[in-house]
Image (spheres, grey):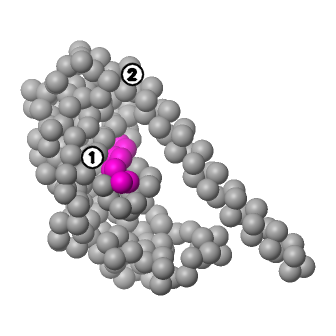
Amino acid sequence: MEKSIKLLNSAILLLVPLLLVGSSIVATSSQLQLVSAQTSQGTNSFSAAGYTGQILTLPPSITQVPVSQNESSVGPSIGSVIGGNWSFTVSDGNLQNFTWNAVAYSLAGKPNGTASITGFTDAKPLGSSSDSIALDGNSTSFAGTANLEINGETAFENVPVALYLLNGNIVSLTLSQQATNGQFSVPLYGIVTSLTQQ
C-alpha cells in the first residue's frame, strides 16, 4: 500500500509540472497568434478596466516543500487567494493611467498583503511596426516596463511587462520572471468589465 502511495505521489509530481508547462505553452501560443494578427489600423483612443484574480493553492503533498521554505519574503505564500482591479487608458496611441492593484488573503480569510503594478512606461505595441497602441477587433497587446510594489513598498523597478487584451473579454499581464527573482512564473489574468472607445 505504501509503495502505491509513493508511486502515486511520484506520478503527481511529474504530472503537475507538465500540466503547468503545457498550459503556459498554449497561453503563449494564443498570445502570439494575437500579436501577429495586430495591425496598425484600429482605434488608438480607448479605455479598459476590470477585475483580476489568482489562486495559489497547491497542496503541500504535491509541492513537497515545507511551509517555511514555501513562503516568500516578497509575494504571497501558496495557500492565498488574490483579487483586485486593473485599468488603463490609451489616448492617441499612448498608454496612460495604468494601474493593477491586488490584495492577497490566506485561505482562512486573513490579509496576506497587497501588490500594485504602477509606472508603466515605454509602452509600445507588440507585432506592429507602428509606435501607436491600437484597439483592433477588441484586442490589443503592448509591452514596456513597470514597477511592482508589495505592501506599499517598491519591490522591483523597471520590470519588463507585456499586456494582452483578448477579444474584449480577458486580459493577461506577463511580468519578467528574471526581473522579479522568479516571483511571477505565470501570467496574471483578469476579466474585462469595461472597454470604451473614445
Residue 139 in picture, x, y percent from top left: 33, 29
Q: Position of residue 95 (x, y in %)?
A: 14, 37
Q: Main secondary structure of the magenta part?
A: strand
Viewer-proximal residue among 166 and 129: 129
Is 187 above or below relative to 114? above
- Which amino acid lies under the numbered mark 2 shown in the image of this protein? Ser
Q: State the extent of the magenta-drawn residues as a range.
A: 171-178
Earlier residue among tags 1 and 2: 2
Q: Which mark is residue 112?
A: none
Q: Considering the numbered disc 1 on the image, is that residue within a helix, a strand or a loop?
A: strand
User: Circle 2: is it few (<14), some (14-19), or many (20+) Cα within 10 Å?
Assistant: few
Query: Where is residue 125 drawn, in percent x and y?
Result: 24, 29
Report which residue position mark 1 lands on: 160
Depicted 55 relative to depicted 31: above or below: below
- State the CA–CA distance, disc 1 to disc 2: 20 Å
Q: Please give left or right for residue 177 compared with residue 140 in the image.
A: right
User: Image point 60% across, 70% down: which residue?
Assistant: 63
The quarter holding residue 64 reads bottom right
Q: Can the viewer see residue 193?
A: no
Q: Is residue 173 magenta?
A: yes
- The quarter of the displayed image where residue 5 is located: bottom right
Read off the residue under disc 2.
36
Residue 99, x across and y down, in percent: 19, 52
